[in-house]
Structures are given as structure tokens and as C-alpha cells.
Image (spheres, rainbow, N blue to C red):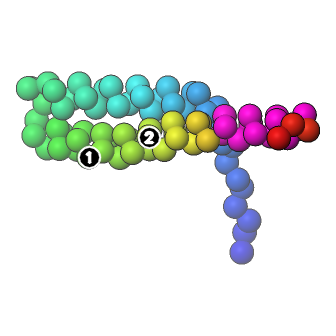
Amino acid sequence: MPSRKRRSAGDFGACKRMLWSGILEAVKLVEDPDTPAERRLKAISCLSTANGVHGHLLSNGEIEQRLAAVEATLAQGSP
């Protein structure tokens, strides 16, 4: 079985910015009265997914910051 190459995780900030940009574009499609119904429904579906992913990114970023602070405190030897 061939081994799969692990993809780079990329830059966390860039990922958040790209995702947020996509969310804003989807909102424009949903709010535009000239957007065909089928395209509007697809944009709504994308928004639902993207908002969930964005929430996870923000949560993971916060957890990462807290973990870094705990690790720094432990490295200093202070409780």
C-alpha cells in the first residue's frame, strides 16, 4: 500500500482569513435578490459548513494560546 504524503498544515492565520473571505462572499450571494434560488441554497449550505469550521478554528486557536501559556508557566517552574 503506497504511503500517503502528509500535507502541510499551513498558516493558521491565513486559513482563518481565507475562510472568512469565503464566508463574506457567500453572504453576498445569499443577500443578493438577483442570485438564482439554486445558487442561493448552495451558498446557504456552504455558509453553514464554513461557519462551523470557522468556529472550530477560533476555538482551537484559543485552546492553543492557553496551552502555550500553561507550558510557559511550567517551564518557569511556577505553579
Residue 53 image offset from top left, x and y in percent? 44, 44
Residue 69 image offset from top left, x and y in percent? 74, 34
Residue 46 image offset from top left, x and y in percent? 31, 43
Q: Residues within 10 Å of mark 1 (few under 14, many from 20)?
A: few
| Location of residue 9 (image quadrant) | top right
Q: Pointer 2: what residue?
A: 55
Span shown in magenta: 64-76
Total tally of numbered discs in the picture: 2
**Residue at x-position 90% and y-position 34%:** 76
Residue 27 image offset from top left, x and y in percent? 25, 29
| Location of residue 11 (image quadrant) | top right
> Does label 1 or label 2 sit earlier along the sequence?
1
In the figure, 20 relative to 74: above or below? above
Considering depth in this image, is 56 or 77 the residue closer to the camera?
A: 77
What predominant SS class does the magenta segment belong to? helix
In the figure, 61 relative to 17: above or below? below
Residue 32: mark in rendering: none
Q: Residues within 10 Å of mark 2 (few under 14, many from 20)?
A: few
Label 1: state its secondary structure: helix
Q: Pointer 1: what residue?
A: 45
Circle 2: residue type: Gly
Residue 66 belongs to magenta span: yes
Label 2: state its secondary structure: helix
Considering depth in this image, is 63 or 4 the residue closer to the camera?
A: 63
Horizontal relation, residue 22 to residue 63: left or right: left
